[in-house]
Image: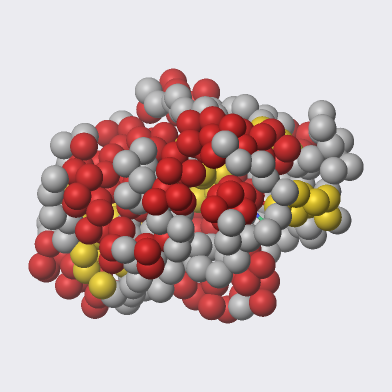
Amino acid sequence: MRVLLAGGAGYIGAHTAVALIEAGHEAVVLDDLSNSSAVAVERVGRITGTTVPLVIGDAAEDAVVAAAFDDHGPFDAIVHLAAFKAVGESTQKPLEYYANNLGTTYALLRVGIARGIRSFLFSSTGTVYSDPADLPFTETSTTSIDLSNAYSKSKRMNEVVLEDVARVNPALSVTSLRYFNPVGAHPSGLIGEDPTGIPNNLMPYVARVAVGSLERVGIFGDDYDTPDGTGQRDYIHVVDLAAGHVAALENAQPGYDVFNLGTGSPVSVLELIAAFERASGRELPREVLPRRAGDVAATYCDPAKAQAELHWQATRTIDDACRDSWNWQSQNPAGYASA
Ligand code: UD1
């Protein structure tokens, strides 16, 4: 397959590009580099021994997407990972988040369908599930659009759009992949997560404490109703997540479908910090802080549907993720800017 990866210079996109190429497919990256680096795309080339074309532009503009097809098409599939993703920022800039996160989908669908793609994969999130009584979440668990932030709402809104578009394009395969918490890095240490500014998410924050660029990990609450009182999440190694995209494309069926991509095993904040201490051989200073607004006690999925229908499952552990994340962070203490 020849695949257009919108947002392919980002954290999940770069790992997905590697997985596609290693599975024998061709990848072309379309990215505006607003929260990603061209260095990542060069390094995907280094890992795979290829040159990966990079089209720099806004995937929300039909003309940009059309030019990518003119210059690098035809494409069999589009993988859409081009979105703004900072949860806190999204509550302050809802219009920017809705315009970008939906606008990219509209343009990619309009142009992609006109140019005859067969499959469209969308990067969604496990935060669309809204009822903790449903844990572990299956694809039929209750979803809501009434979520705590514009980022999560934009993801659920996209799913609604995609389902309707699939209905009137019955030959097209449209798939939403609901990611749980992506962590880790490519074992080469060449690509990894490179958030701008102070990381919001736990794993990149812990990694920066380990390299010494941040002082201590703040634990957002230790009084949750969980075994050790800290929040539990379903951390999935980004290399497993990337393999999930390849499996979804290779097993794509006409119509709309949804798959959870997670491990199914909850890991607490304290367990993740302990795993990172083992991986780095460093003691990580920490302090307990109040709960973060909008956080839930626990979220994790039942990945059985992806296992049965995509023949995919996560195989890497939290220790693998911490080892690879440490390898990436210690080789690139300032991320791609270290290059
Ligand atoms: C967050 C987003 C979610 C997004 C996901 C991507 C929020 C509310 N949700 O999920 O929409 O899809 O990232 O991976 O931001 N924690 C600390 N200290 C920290 C950071 C986090 O204790 O410095 C705790 C949190 O309370 C939580 C766990 O670590 O229990 C994971 O947090 P985080 O990595 O931010 O992910 P989520 O909040 O699950």
Q: Position of residue 23 (x, y in %)?
A: 21, 34
| Color theme of the render | secondary structure
Q: Quadrant of the N terminus?
A: top left
Q: Is residue 146 left or right of residue 333?
A: right
Q: Quadrant of the C terminus?
A: bottom left
Q: Could you tell me how many numbered marks the image carries?
A: 0
Return the residue nearer the eye: 41 or 330: 330
Q: Residue at x 48, y 31 (%)?
A: 320
Q: Is residue 148 above or below residue 183?
A: below
Q: Residue at x 72, y 49 (%)?
A: 285
Q: Is residue 194 left or right of residue 267?
A: left
Q: Is residue 228 above or below residue 153?
A: above
Quarter-wise, where is residue 54 in the image? Answer: bottom left
Q: Position of residue 159 (x, y in %)?
A: 51, 53
Q: Residue at x 57, y 36 (%)?
A: 281
Q: Residue furthest right?
A: 223
Return the residue nearer the eye: 153 or 45: 45
On the question of residue 251 being in view, the answer is yes
Quarter-wise, where is residue 60 in the image? Answer: bottom left
Q: Is residue 71 above or below residue 250?
A: below
Q: Is residue 81 left or right of residue 282?
A: left
Q: Position of residue 332 (x, y in %)?
A: 40, 56
Q: Position of residue 87 (x, y in %)?
A: 63, 63
Return the residue nearer the eye: 302 or 41: 41
Q: Is residue 123 left or right of residue 200?
A: left
Q: Residue at x 34, y 72 (%)?
A: 32
On the question of residue 82 being in view, the answer is no
